[in-house]
Amino acid sequence: MSTVTLRPSTWITQVFDDGQSSPESKSRAKDIGSLVNAAFDKEGGLHAVYNAYNVLRYAFHPAQNLDRQILHRSLVATTRNPGNTELASRLKIIPFAFDPQSRHISLNVDASSRPHVIFSSLHGLQYVILSPGGWSLGLISDHAMRNKPWTILFDSKDIPLLIMNHLAAGLVIARLKTSGWQEERVALPPDAADADLMCLGAQINNETLHFALITHQNMTATLWSGSMSVDGAPGPTPIPK
């Protein structure tokens, strides 16, 4: 039998925002980080998104700089001096309004290390992606159930796919098409169709989406699992516009 030796590790803490860019808000700690998420790209680089002083911010650090001194110095320096061209690409403002009452934000990185951010605004569920020209904004749905978490993943072509709760259609798959986001209803068993439900997780294997759900109804919680094709045939029932 082989043995595994666990080596002691050191936790590294980092300062993403010390309030220097908005001194008047420095004492209001609740203004920072009520929405936060992070992801690593395939090279090990760290991507993070969070709210601070009524705006969304995005921070990035390449893997080779992920040590306590460099990360702390560069992020704080960028915050104090936004004109620092060497570090400007590592801390950005996402220039779109978000719902201050929202509880969820997601950040995912595709195979090209591009960040994809999904958040709630007063107009619905919004999707932004960072490109060389800046941030691009698109509305996913104005019928997403407020303050219900969603699940985002990428298919084999690196196209994002979202699983979310819909106000009128229960569980919905939203796929990014050339014409925008297309919503498709997930067919659920009768016992789950009218229940309070939430997607717990999902995975795509060989163009098949596998997902797990939990439903709550009549003081009973039930776990479900399901699968569907993501190559367009067969698929769930499209929601009429």
Image: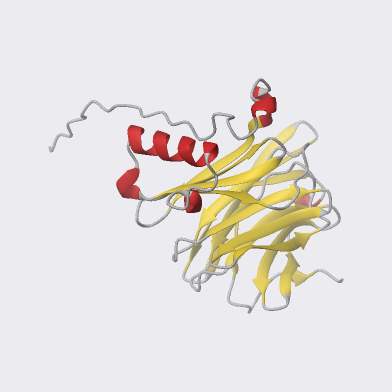
Q: Nearer the viewer, residue 136 or 19?
A: 19
Residue pictured at 74% horizontal, 67% vertical? 184
Q: Is residue 227 visible?
A: no
| Up-down relation of residue 179 to residue 85 (above or below) | below
Q: Is residue 44 visible?
A: yes
In the picture, measured across the screen, residue 51 lies left or right of residue 78, that is: right
| Up-down relation of residue 75 to residue 107 (above or below) | above
Residue pictured at 75% horizontal, 66% vertical? 183
Image location of residue 151, percent across then percent down: 61, 52
In the picture, measured across the screen, residue 225 lies left or right of residue 170, that is: left
Image location of residue 130, percent across then percent down: 57, 61
State the residue lying farthest toward the top.
27
State the residue lying farthest toward the left.
1
| Quarter of the figure with the C terminus | bottom right
Residue 26: quadrant of the picture: top right
Image location of residue 217, percent across then percent down: 78, 38
Image location of residue 58, percent across then percent down: 56, 47
